[in-house]
Each structure stands twice: as C-alpha cells, then as structure tokens.
Image (spheres, helix red, strand yellow):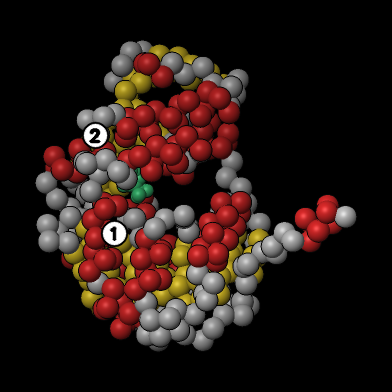
Amino acid sequence: MTTTLKAASRPSTPLAFFDDQHPSAADFRRDVLDGLSAPQKYLSPIYFYDAEGSALFDAITELPEYYPTRTELSILDTIGNELAERAGSGAVIVEPGSGSSIKIRKLIDALDTPAAYVGLDISGEHLQQACTVLAEDYPGLSIGAICADFTTGLDLDGYDLPGGRRLVFFPGSTIGNFEIQDAIDLLKGFRAGMRDDDAILIGVDRVKDEQTLVDAYDDSQGVSAAFNLNLVTRINRELDGTIDAGKLRHLALWNEKASRIEMHLQAVDDIEFSIAGETFAMKSGETIHTENSHKFTPEAFSALAARAGFTVRTHWSDERELFTLYWLEPDSKA
Ligand code: AVJ
C-alpha cells in the first residue's frame, strides 16, 4: 500500500540530539501588567518577537540606517582565516539564542572542519526547525539542539560532544540588550559551562556619533517605529487590550550617561486603557520604556568582560569602527 510507503519514507530527524529542558515559559500577561504598573512603565524587549515582530526585525536588518547586521557580517567575511586558526580543527560551536541567521553559516564555513554545532534556544519549535535546516545543509556536521533558557547558564555536561575546542558564538550585540550587571552575570553563566581553553566570539556595537546611533533606531521608513509599536498591537490582541496605538509615538534616544540607545513608546495625549481587565493611565509625554541597546568602547567592553572572568585575546572591527567582534578567553579558574 502506498500510504505505508509514504509514512516510512519520511526522513527521521537529522539531529544528533534534541534535549528539551522545559525552560519555564515567559509569562507575557504577568510581565506586561507588572511593567505597566511601575513608576517608569517598561516592557521587556523579549516580547517584540512574535511572528510580525520577527519579520519587522528582519526588515530592520536590511535598512540603510541599521548598520550592525551588515557590518558584523562583513567583519566575519574578512577574519575567517584568523578564526580558523584560533578555533583549531574539530571545534564545537555553541550558539546561545540560535536563530536562523546566515552569521552561523559564515562561521561554520570559515572554520577548519568543525566537528559539531549545538544550538540553544528558549523556543523549542524555532530551534528544532533552524537546526534541522542547518543539519540538512551541513551533513558532515554533528548538530545538537538544547531547548533551554541560556540566561540561566550554559551547561554542556552530559552531552556526548566531540572533544575539540568549544567556541561560544554570541553575535548581533544581543549582549547590549542586558543591563550591565545582567550582562556580566550572563557571561559568568557562559563561563561556568566552559573549560579553560574554550572561547567566546561575541559581536558588540560600538559608541559612535549620536546621529548615526539614533538613526539606526529611528529610520526614515518607519520600520523601527512599526517594530516598537507592534508590541502594542500584540498586547491588544493577546491580552484583550484597548490601547490606542495612534496615541503612542515611537521614541529612540541616546542616553549618554548609560551609553545606550533607549526605545520608548511616548503618549501624545493623556490616555487611559485596559489590559486583561486592569486599567492604566498615562499623562501626555509619559513613556513606556521598551528596550535598551548598550554601546561599548573597546575599553568599556574589555572591562565588562574582565568583571565576568574573561580576557579579550583579540578583537576585530570594520574600517569605520562601527562594530567589533571580540575573542574572549576565560581567566583560568584559580
Ligand atoms: C539585535 C536585538 C540587539 O538592539 O540593535 C533593533 C534589536 N531593536 N532595532 C538591537 C533592535 C531595535 C537589536 N538586537
């Protein structure tokens, strides 16, 4: 019978392993109600990325004003040989927050016969899909996936991994979305799962002139604004909200003292709304703080890395010094 044949011909999963650690799911409702009850209203940027928000973020990476993605890719293109030399042959690439990005492909292509790739992500479905596609494209690479919250650490014990040097790949200046102490704690968490001769390759956006920074988060086509405002649409849809998105405007500002771009949603009028049965009010001009994106000088980032127990072995920037990739090695455990 053809039906049996069809079922039997379905390829089995090409992944070496898929380990679901069942990370506790983020509580969107609780977090939104808490954040909007604070004196300075805030929402976590993790909630930007529903289907629409993820598509808008992809569009952001293509904008003329949004330089980080293309700059990081161009740096990766020029440093392939050095990366291969540092990582050695048979390296094991570990990617916390593994996306479907082309950056990981550039790294895999650059290295000298990497032995394995391990993706970690809080979203199991997204992770499995991204890793499966990667496994199909790189049949010689052993690919594993761990559904886990990487902000709670990077525990690789108990997985049957090849013995090569482990290289933790953390691109995109995602580190910039964390408060400084949280960024240090995140790197410490990575450190705890690493051996003395492992390394981190991390992409970090740099301090530069204010106009370039602000434009990257407030582009002329309004895509960044749509990305920020999509959070309101999501709250209205998923949490029975009544926020008039037309009464909020996208705001991107450079906070010099904290060395970060902040995104806010600013009320253009006194407004009231309800979410999940709770009511909220905003005065005209009041904001909801939706994202921080910290920018680092090489000195500031080296200092942060040092506080987490890492030394900057080397770093690479583009010619215009817009963005930097750092190679971090752990200070040996005392
Ligand atoms: C790539 C997630 C770090 O902060 O630049 C882009 C997200 N926010 N435009 C960044 C983002 C607004 C982005 N990260």
Q: Position of residue 18 (x, y in %)?
A: 64, 65
Residue at 61% x, 54% y: name it: 124
Q: Earlier in the sequence, mark 2 or mark 1?
A: 1
Residue 169 image-quadrant placement: bottom left
| Element assignment for label 2 | loop
Does the closest atom of ligand 1 sit within 8 Å of the Cβ of label 2?
no
Could you say which quadrant of the image residue 244 lies in?
top left
Callout 1: helix, strand or loop? Answer: helix
Left or right, 322 with reference to 221 = left
The N terminus, quarter of image: bottom right
Q: Are marks 2 and 1 in contact (CB under 8 Å)?
A: no
Q: Which residue is mark 1?
A: 73
Is 331 situated above or below 74? below
**Count of numbered circles on the image:** 2
Q: Position of residue 231 (x, y in %)?
A: 45, 31
Residue 303 or residue 237, whichever sits in front:
237
Marks 2, 1: nearer the viewer: 1
Kind of residue at badge 2: Asp
* Front in this rendered view, residue 63 or 28: 63
Q: Nearer the viewer, residue 164 or 238?
A: 164
Distance from Cα at disc 2 to Cα at disc 1:
21 Å
- Residue at 45 percent across and 41 percent down: it is 54
Circle 1 residues within 10 Å: few <14, some 14–19, many ≥20 = some
- The relative height of residue 263 versus residue 313 in the rendered view (above or below) is above
Question: Residue 91 shows which numbered tag?
Answer: none
Q: Which residue is mark 2?
A: 219
- Residue 280 is left or right of residue 18, and the answer is left
Measured from the top left, where is residue 326 in percent x and y?
Answer: 27, 69
Q: Is residue 1 left or right of residue 52?
A: right
